[in-house]
Amino acid sequence: MSEKELAKKQQAEVTRREQTEEVFVPAADIWETEDQIMIRMDMPGVAKNDTEVKIERDTLLVQGKVSSEAQGNLLYGEQRVGNFRREFSLSDDLDHEHVSAQMNDGILTITIGKAEAVKPRKIEILAAS
Amino acid sequence: MLLSRRMPFWDIERTLDEMSRVFDSFGGPLGLRSMPRGTFPAINLYDHENEMVLTAEVPGVKKEDLDLTVVENSITLTGKRNGDAGEDARYYRRERPVGTFTRTLTLAEKVDPDKVSAEYRDGVLTVHLPKVKAAKPKAIQIKAS
């Protein structure tokens, strides 16, 4: 590829990049308890109705929009606005039917049950009679 | 362009996200990709004619764990965020900052500390900072001699 062609290609990429809308990834904690997996995500200022949680095959998708209210002339800005999206792939060890989500104080908590087969089982010791 | 004014470093951040996506994509039981970074809490500051409005993203922080101090034109927000999983929890990923935090901002204009008000909703703290009278624009009449 000649230098000129390369420059042209880079220019095209730059242009395309500016057109695509920015999608950000919200921070998440993920942990496991005895019988479930918990995902907790920071979503300050996001309305419950602007958030979508869905499962497609083995993918858990969380997406939505942070609406930027016109609060006056912005002097200084760190907060992220626009669309957010994050995907998690679910293993077969998880019960895809038992998923619940809750939004509270700007935090989204998703609870996923573990499949019966992987839950710890206590084995009772029988006394030989 | 509105976007680049809000996030002057969004392109860098995007590159960092892209990098961590490449390097992180192999690890983690749930196949996670990128991870955000930054100072906690994220703050926005807006200007109005009579007041300035500060918003801080403090999701999961209890109202009673937040402390706000205003001295002349300096505003300090301190607080604490608890890590809330139980002791028997086994973490796969911890991206959300926990612990104590302090942020101080120096405002361009003096505000009246007695009239400052704050509200907390959906993990966002909104602080109204009324400007002191002297700082408001005042039209001066030019007299003819």
Image: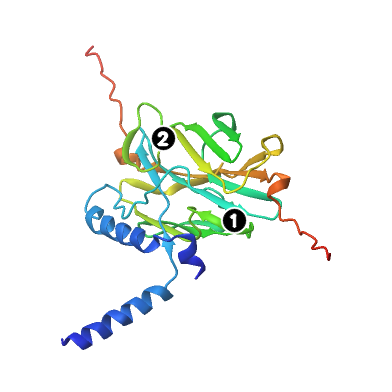
Check residue A49 in the rendering and tell me which mark sits there, or answer none.
Answer: 1
In the image, taking residue B35 as reference, residue B135 lies left or right, namely right
Viewer-closest of A17 and B133: B133
Rendered view: A71 above or below B66:
below
Image location (x, y in percent) of residue A47: 59, 53
In the image, taking residue B58 as reference, residue B109 lies left or right, namely right
Tell me which residue sits at (41%, 35%) in the image.
Answer: B98
Q: Are marks 2 and 1 on the same chain?
A: no
| Residue closest to the far top | A129
Position of the N terminus of chain A by quadrant? bottom left
Check disc 2 and report the residue beneath it.
B98
| Residue closest to the far front | B145
What chain is tagged by disc 2?
Answer: B
Question: Please, what is the three-letter code of the amino acid marked with disc 2?
Answer: Val
Image location (x, y in percent) of residue B121: 62, 43
Tell me which residue sits at (36%, 43%) in the image.
Answer: B95
What chain is tagged by disc 1?
Answer: A
* Residue B58 can be seen, yes or no: no
Tell me which residue sits at (32%, 82%) in the image.
Answer: A12
Comparing marks 2 and 1, which lies closer to the viewer? 2
Image location (x, y in percent) of residue A7: 25, 83
Within 10 Å of disc 1 (Cα), the crowding (few <14, some 14-19, many 20+) is: few
Within 10 Å of disc 2 (Cα), the crowding (few <14, some 14-19, many 20+) is: some
Tell me the distance, in whole angstroms, between the alpha carbons under discs 2 and 1: 27 Å
Rendered view: B34 above or below A114:
below
Rendered view: B134 above or below A87:
above
